[in-house]
Image (tube, helix red, strand yellow):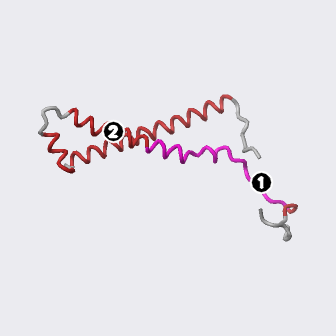
Amino acid sequence: MTPFKPRITQEEARRDHSRMLRFLAINAVLGMALGLAMAAAIILLDVAGIGSRISHSTNPVLPLLLIGFPMAMIFGGAVTATAIWTMPYERLFAPESRKKDDDDKEDPDRQPR
């Protein structure tokens, strides 16, 4: 049995794809912001003396980049992967359930599948 494939026009497909890409881009940006916030918290809370080492460094930009950039990428990727996992695509194109009629009465002799 093949899965349900909706028939949509090119314009509807284009609109749907742009909505999905916007959804993923927003989640990626939010994840990167979360990663930068976590890096800032690590530095400001001076976890393992990282903040004090950076403040006493002659070139503090490099350690900031080495902490901030990977954290932003990891959190951005994780949030984007979670967004892909929970994407409402199947719900959007799910066939509508039909209402039961009087003709659809349950058969007591029928075995469950």
* Earlier-in-chain disc, 1 versus 2: 2
Span highlighted in magenta in the image: 78-101
The part of the image, by quadrant, that contains residue 39 is top left
Left or right position of 108 against 15: right
Residue at 84% from the left image edge and 60% from the top image edge: 101
The part of the image, by quadrant, that contains residue 28 is top left
Q: Which residue is mark 2?
A: 70
Mark 1 to mark 2 CA distance (whole Å):
50 Å
Q: Amino acid at mark 1?
A: Arg
Residue 96 magenta:
yes
SS class of the residue under badge 2?
A: helix
How would you rate the neighbour count of disc 2 (Cα within 10 Å): few for under 14, some for 14-19, many for 20 or more?
some
Residue sitting farthest toward the bottom: 108
Residue at 78% from the left image edge and 65% from the top image edge: 112
Q: Amino acid at mark 2?
A: Pro
Q: Which residue is mark 1?
A: 98
How would you rate the neighbour count of disc 1 (Cα within 10 Å): few for under 14, some for 14-19, many for 20 or more?
few
